[in-house]
Amino acid sequence: MVLIHVPRPKNAYNPNRPVGSLLKNQVEHLREAETKLPARYRHRIDTYTNAIKTEGEAAAYIRKVTEAIHAAHADAERARRAAQRRRLPRRGTVIEIAAAATERSAQKRNVRKRETGKGKSARKESKSPTRSRKKSPTNSRTKSKPRGRKSHKK
């Protein structure tokens, strides 16, 4: 593979150059992000964005806002982890709870069998033979009439 040499531009960053439109837009976006930060992070940034006239001033403002955003996220992460450590241990998952419920119901069934003295075989013997139901004769009033076309007389 052939290595292609790309020279660095000599005038990429000039701290004394006036701010361009792209950099102005970036400063405006960061000002919006700064307004959404908690107050304890905003007081460190005491720059009025309309007063930024050079690339050096814009770079300093961008650095301050970026550091404040990173600090806010780091503090929030520490707070989340501390809250997780303070939480009480979970009682158990749904599967463990369901397994415990089936064990308890099986124990209850065994207790009932012992109390009544009837196991499966004893219950079979005590059942009476099934009766056959008598079929009732069809009632002539309940028979449906054949449906056909009704003739309309005028």
Image (cartoon, rainbow, N blue to C red):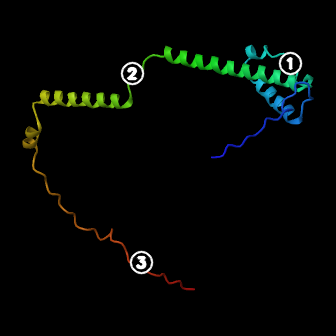
Q: Nearer the viewer, mark 1 or mark 2?
A: 1
Q: Residue at x 48, y 16 (%)?
A: 87
Q: Residues within 10 Å of mark 2 (few under 14, many from 20)?
A: few
Residue placed under numbered mark 2 in the picture: 91
Secondary element under disc 1, as helix, strand or loop, is: loop
Residue 40 seen from this side: yes
Residue placed under numbered mark 1 in the picture: 47
Asked if labels 2 and 1 touch by Cβ distance under 8 angstroms, the answer is: no
Query: Picture coordinates of residue 37 (x, y %)?
Result: 74, 21
Distance in Å between CA atoms under marks 3 and 2: 67 Å
Sequence-wise, the earlier of marks 1 and 2 is 1
Residue placed under numbered mark 3 in the picture: 147
133 or 64, which is in the foreground? Answer: 64
Q: Is residue 131 left or right of residue 15?
A: left
Q: In the figure, 125 relative to 39: above or below? A: below
Q: Residue at x 92, y 28 (%)?
A: 17
Q: Residue furthest bottom?
A: 154
Q: Nearer the viewer, mark 3 or mark 2?
A: 2
Q: In the figure, 138 relative to 88: above or below? A: below
Sequence-wise, the earlier of marks 3 and 2 is 2
Query: Picture coordinates of residue 36 (x, y %)?
Result: 75, 24
Q: Is residue 101 left or right of residue 111?
A: right
Secondary element under disc 3, as helix, strand or loop, is: loop
